Amino acid sequence: MNARTVWCSSVLLALLGASVASAESRFSVSVGHNLGRDTDEPLRWAQQDAERMDAVFGQLGGVPEDRRLLLRGESVSNLKLGLARMRGRIEEARRAGERTLLFFFYSGHGDESALRLGGEALPLAELQRLLSEVPATVTVAVLDACHSGALVRGRSKGLKSAPAFDVSFLRQVGPQGRVFIASAGAHEVAQESDSLRGSFFTHHLISGLRGAADVDADGRVSLTEAYGHVYHRTLAGSHASTAAVQHPELSSQLAGEGDLFLTTLSRAHAQLELPPRVGDSVVLVDERTLQVMAEVEPRGEEPVRVALPAGRYRVQVRRGPQVLYGKVYLSWGDKQRLNPEALEVRTLALHQRKGALLEASNWRLQAALGAGRSSTQLGGWGPQVGVLLARESSGGLGWSFLGGLSLGATRGATNAQRFEQAELGLWSGLGLAGSVGRVSMGAHAGLGVLGLAQRATSPDAERRRELGLPTRRTRTGAGAATFAALSAEVPVSARTGLFARLGGHVALLREDEKLRTQLAPQLLLGCTWGL
């Protein structure tokens, strides 16, 4: 082996060692608790905020599932146990020569001396010790908790007046860099919103991490970008819509150069690109849960990419006195650009408060073509058409309405006659509906009334005509029916879709002076339009 080979091998080994040493393992602990002391008003969305942050850490923050800890409504002892286990995992990674990063997020009640978890207290001094014992290269701690007072309007995150948390321990210079972000400053309350289904602060933080804060459009959201976004949006939102103003605070003691990147948008299941000048603000709402996933203010001439899980979303674009509304579906790995021309223009009501979401019309008109069996004992299959009105549930699995008109034609025969029959049905029913990925599913049952017109023709019509006898006989009738149906719909655009419905009805009719029942199955395919 010559000297040059030895030199090259040494360089490669050095580079490999540097690469291994610079590998980064990420961990997260997300804590949410809706309850505080007995005198505290319960929160509604703290635990859900923790779930959402945990999802962002996993989807975009590079934290594997086995390195994420989510605690909802847990005791202080379980929080301590979770941090101890996470400390052990981080120690293992550090011994392997890896850089480590710990995200810590808390949403719930707090006061001047402690976090309040369901009647128990975790003193701030003890939280200081627990975090300092975690040997992470970088620790990013976020506390979304109330610091003082109660709001006259809206719900505060904690009701007791209290001075700001003493967070001086996070400013101490130590062997690891630490960053602390508080949702509100001294003598301020951290507020949550039923419209947003979460706190103002966490809502804007998650929006920023999903791409709204990516100012330089490099596909990554840094600590600097995230804090700048959450500070200005929380301040502006609380100033405009509540009786108290929130000023988020940041305390950082990071050694070394370069920025700390919290999320990478390319890790997302899907991305929606918002074109420049699409509007003043854009709100994206999960169609299944009605959770506001992101709120974005498009910037200048650059498009904004928003990282989202695959699924169906409502899009609300505010543009001056108008709102553009529509729906998009993002499949796994999809990178879609929002088309404003496909959105419906609506006028914003003057009395609507800032931040409130428009309630979308869930009524849909359906036109169908298919085949069905006769409702009479004669049997026979024939074509059917229908015009139906359906009302979807608002988010998740919920009640749904289905009703409308159907018209069918069938033919049949006996040894004595041939029959042609037309049926008109009027239907109304209830059921359950929800979404599974891209497909909307529904199951309905209900009642209907039937009107029938039947024409019977004799097989020997020519001979009967020669004898002057009638060759045809026409009669009408009516009856009742019960129906059941299963349906599936796939969206084509923001307002249109294709659907299939398999079902049938049991008709109760008087035939030959007797009441008879008959099962009549049916298959319909068609188009649907949002109203």
Image (cartoon, rainbow, N blue to C red):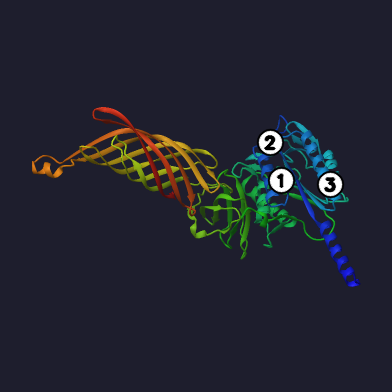
Q: Amino acid at mark 1?
A: Glu
Mark 1 neighbour density, 10 Å: few (under 14) some (14–19) many (20 or more) = some
Q: Amino acid at mark 2?
A: Asn
Kindly identify which numbered label has been placed on residue 390. none
Quickly name the residue at label 2.
34
Quickly name the residue at label 1.
65
* Distance Cα–Cα, label 1 vs label 2: 24 Å
Residue at image location 25% in from the left, 35% down from the top = 477
Q: Is residue 263 left or right of residue 297?
A: right
Residue 4, percent from left and from top:
88, 72
Residue at image location 62% in from the left, 60% down from the top = 304
Which circle's residue, 2 or 3, is located before the other in the chain? Answer: 2
**Front-lying residue, 437 or 56:** 437
Kindly identify which numbered label has been placed on residue 92. 3
Q: Is residue 234 left or right of residue 401?
A: right
Residue 338, percent from left and from top:
55, 58
* Distance Cα–Cα, label 2 vs label 3: 33 Å
